Amino acid sequence: MMTSAAFFLLVSLSAGVLTGGVLVVRGGREDSLIGLSVATVCCVTALLLLDRYVGLAFSRDIGFYLIFPGVFGVLYFCTVMRGVGD
């Protein structure tokens, strides 16, 4: 059973996903990457919340597989942008 605090957190995370989606759609290259990172972190946190309260066995694995491409994408993007400025 989800408490009211967990439900509020889930609603707040959905607002974060929407904000990240707006940044991806309307932003440039840098803003799109930031928006994608925000949306990914919010989705992973929501999956972990669902795993804790609902008991979905696979949500922790999905969150794990979602967070790593975001980290490596940011590192790659920083490497590319550092090379563009030189």
Image (cartoon, rainbow, N blue to C red):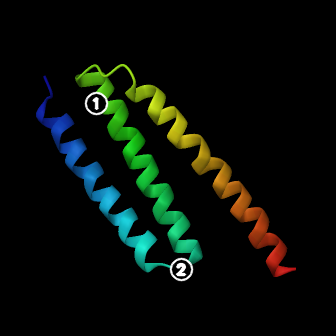
Residue 34 image position (x, y, % from top left): 52, 64
Q: Amino acid at mark 2?
A: Gly
Q: Nearer the viewer, residue 62 or 14?
A: 62
Q: Secondary structure at mark 1?
A: helix
Residue 55 image position (x, y, % from top left): 28, 19
User: Where does the N terminus fall, quadrant-wise?
Assistant: top left
Q: Which residue is mark 2?
A: 28
In the rendering, which numbered label is found on residue 3? none
The vertical placement of 6 against 85, above or below, is above
Q: Are marks 2 and 1 in contact (CB under 8 Å)?
A: no
Taking the spot 30% from the left edge, 62% from the top edge, the residue there is 18
Q: Which residue is mark 1?
A: 50
Residue 17 image position (x, y, % from top left): 34, 56
Q: Residues within 10 Å of mark 1 (few under 14, many from 20)?
A: some
Q: How many marks?
A: 2
Q: Is residue 41 left or right of residue 11?
A: right
Q: Secondary structure at mark 2?
A: loop
Q: Amino acid at mark 1?
A: Leu
